[in-house]
Image (spheres, grey):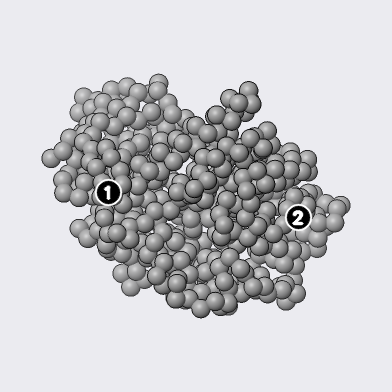
Amino acid sequence: MKKAQIIIDKYFLTGKVDKRIFGSFIEQLGRAVYEGIYQEGSPLSDEQGFRKDTLELVRELQVPIVRYPGGNFVSGFKWEDSVGPKNLRPARPELAWGVIENNHFGLDEFVDWAKKADTDIMMAVNLGTRGPEEARNLLEYCNFKGGTYYSDMRKTNGHAEPHNIKTWCLGNEMDGPWQMGHKTAYEYGRTAAETSRIMKMLDPEIETVACGSSNLMMPTFGDWEYTVLDECYDLVDYMSLHQYYGNAADDTPDFLANSKGMDDFISSVVSICDAVRAKKHGKKRINLSFDEWNVWYHSNAADEKLKKWGQAPHQLEDIYNFEDALLVGSMLITLLRHADRVKMACLAQLVNVIAPIMTSDTGAWRQTIFYPYMYTSIFGRGTVLNTQVLAPVYDSRNYCDVSYLDSVCVWNEEKDTLTIFAVNKSLEEDLEVSCDLRQFEGYQVKEHIVLTNDDMKAVNTEADPEKVVPVESAASRIDGGKLSTVLGKHSWNMIRLAK
């Protein structure tokens, strides 16, 4: 059996967890909205058409913020189409995903849904086919109290009080040539700067997110971030990151090693942000919003066969297996390990479209990735300890010196709890792990939750929704202030300790 050690010190802190790190994403794409969170006429929906079963699962995840409405969709979004009487809203060809958008669900409906889901909103503005003026008008509609054209339009549409949305994405993936209104780094940086400046003139309390690279492999990565921030550093608050991972090669060790790639990506963007700050002799620290991340590859072949110009097709509907849940668990650990700089993150997406929740006309169920996301969201709040891991390593096809153990410790001093999240990536061996907790006098193991399965490709379906579910373990104990545990081969683990 391999051995590993987790080393922590209660005085060596990474940073406080911003709860928005456990955010998610809803785009007007596929069945994320229609048949996902919203289905008029369904016996499963409430009086507003919101799926009640979906709402229950979203609340179970305790999602603190949801990004909306895109994604690539936002670069062609005319927000005015999505408000007012539904029978007067125009249907439009939606160029990003090749469908017809009827706008029966729009901005105001999403605000109402978010309230029922107990979540805040991260709103994106269209900087593809539109610009600063339309972004300002949208902000006025959402946040201005009244007495102006767009705020009175909101009142006429049935929302007397402002939506009060405080987090705003300045476009989406503007470095991508697939994006409507794709721009050079300089063009986008100038546009982002002016948009943010004008929006903050209207509402100084908002925070804005500038678009970073669409993924780490973009040929402009690095130069894009530096050039964009060089133009808008003084006017924005966050830089975004996007990254998806897949296992088309069916190479599980390499697939699970992708959390190391995510870690390197975050560190690189932090370095670039700090380089711009140093150049400008700036005092403000640009933090990160990792506002698209997940596993995405299962649905690629099916999506290539879709006919264009349908409505709410089964698009990007990855059916997640057990090994996907392991990587999602590791990616959540990676985000927490960077809690000093990653303040927001969005698992993309929330329902049906590369999502932890799936629906049909007869019900909703939890995909495998639901569980590490839920437990980390609920119990990963507090202060991240500077968690050092001493463990055996391996080389994979694309990575070197990959630790078999991913782990992070989160201390909630107010509640006197300590939570250890850990993934054993070994496909062959259990891992014996120790951790000296004598600084946390009186703490005892309250529960050890394990997600594992003999079949790496096992999936949850509507017919068999509990194929991959967490179980309790008795493998963890404290003796003389020292924790010892055994993490089973290919397993995600959460060990909760409290006084």
Q: Which of 171 and 491 is in front in this view?
A: 171
Residue shown at 41% from the left, 66% from the top = 300
Q: How many marks?
A: 2
The outermost residue toward the left is 1
User: What kind of residue is marked 1?
Assistant: Arg
Figure quadrant of residue 496: top left
Q: Which of 489 and 152 is in front in this view?
A: 489
Residue shown at 46% from the left, 36% from the top = 268
Relative to 139, 348 lies left or right:
left
Residue 431, placed above or below residue 134: above
Q: Which of 278 and 297 is in front in this view?
A: 278
* Pointer 1 local density, CA inside 10 Å: few below 14, some 14–19, many at least 20: few
User: What kind of residue is marked 2?
Assistant: Glu
Which quadrant of the rendered structure holds the C terminus?
A: top left
**Residue 69 is at least partly visible in this image:** no
Figure quadrant of residue 78: bottom right
Measured Cα–Cα span from mark 2 to mark 1? 47 Å
Residue 397: mark: 1
Residue 345 percent coordinates (x, y): 50, 46
Label 2 sits on residue: 134
Q: Which of 20 and 277 is in front in this view?
A: 277
Of labels 2 and 1, earlier in sequence is: 2
**Residue 76 is at least partly visible in this image:** yes
Q: Is mark 2 on a helix, strand or loop?
A: helix
Residue 437: mark: none
* Pointer 2 local density, CA inside 10 Å: few below 14, some 14–19, many at least 20: some
Residue shown at 69% from the left, 59% from the top = 129
Residue 42 percent coordinates (x, y): 54, 76
Residue shown at 54% from the left, 73% from the top = 312
Which quadrant of the rendered structure holds the N terminus?
A: top left
Residue 261 percent coordinates (x, y): 38, 43
